[in-house]
Amino acid sequence: MLIDQSVIVITAAGTLIGKTIAIHLASLGAKLALVDSNISNLEATQYACSQFSRHIDIFHLKNTQPCTIKQVFTRIHRQLGTFNVLLNTWPKCTDTPHILEPNAINEFNDVMCNSATTFFSVGQVAATLMQDNKQPSLIINLALKPSNHHALLSDTSISVIQGLTVSWAKELSSFNIRVGAIIPITPDEETMLHTALQEEIVSSMEYIITNDSFNGRILEAEC
């Protein structure tokens, strides 16, 4: 898959890692659809990408309800035509609670029902639109909280992403849709989304896009 011939949807595009990825892809000639709930951050990413390309469109996600997600992706499809790559970032959420915490059940429900549902909805809507493409398509799941600090996910959330990546890859292969995932790895004492880790995530993403045999697998971005 050639990046300069791709239309790429980036969720959480207003965050630090979303902006970093968008700038890199814009510099390689991709057409971008940037999606985020924070309109000012979204516009800042668009401005940063504009020095490389005029083909940068933004789409404000007002909330994470499945119907709203569908509306945004329908707008992308109508405005840009078919898109062939989705970067699906785990939505902002609380960490998975410890089992002995008093409010553990409610907090766990928030992670699994809200964050996992949003993540699944984005993938499901994109795959539904992609299946009608007459070209190879790709979904990349990013196991990272859309935050500038302490961005790594809990083991529980990562396991959900790993499981969905493998199952989606099997289900969508007949539609010529590949699915991969990137899981950032840092030393136990380090949870910051520092520059070296950002660069490794971007490198991993570029590898998955350009390697047409990559499917149903997970890359660990480690520095």
Image (cartoon, rainbow, N blue to C red):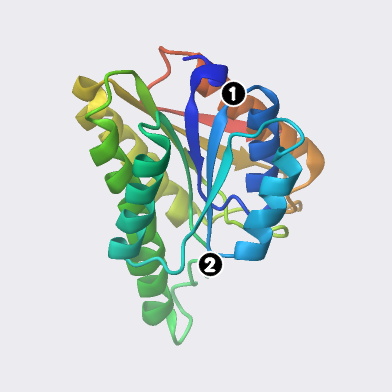
Q: Nearer the viewer, residue 137 or 133?
A: 133
User: Would residue 223 be visible to someone looking at this image?
Assistant: no
**Residue 128 lies in what quarter of the image?**
top left
Mark 1 in CB contact with mark 2 (< 8 angstroms): no
Mark 2 neighbour density, 10 Å: few (under 14) some (14–19) many (20 or more): some
* Image location of residue 133, percent across then percent down: 27, 25
> Between disc 1 and disc 2, whose residue precedes?
2
Q: Find disc 1 in the rendering and name its residue.
A: 206
* Image location of residue 7, percent across then percent down: 48, 30
Q: Residue at x 45, y 55 (%)?
A: 157
- SS class of the residue under badge 2? loop
* Image location of residue 183, percent across then percent down: 55, 39
Q: Nearer the viewer, residue 144 or 124?
A: 124
**Would you say 187 lies left or right of 18 here?**
right
Amino acid carrying label 2: it is: Asp
* Image location of residue 95, percent across then percent down: 53, 67
**Would you say 2 lies left or right of 64 here?**
right
Closer to the eye: label 1 or 2 = 1
- Which of the labelled discs sits on residue 95, or is there none? 2
Up/down of 11 relative to 199, above or below? below
Q: Residue at x 57, y 56 (%)?
A: 145
Up/down of 146 relative to 85, above or below? below
User: Would residue 91 be visible to someone looking at this image?
Assistant: yes
Q: Residue at x 59, y 23 (%)?
A: 206
Amino acid carrying label 1: it is: Glu
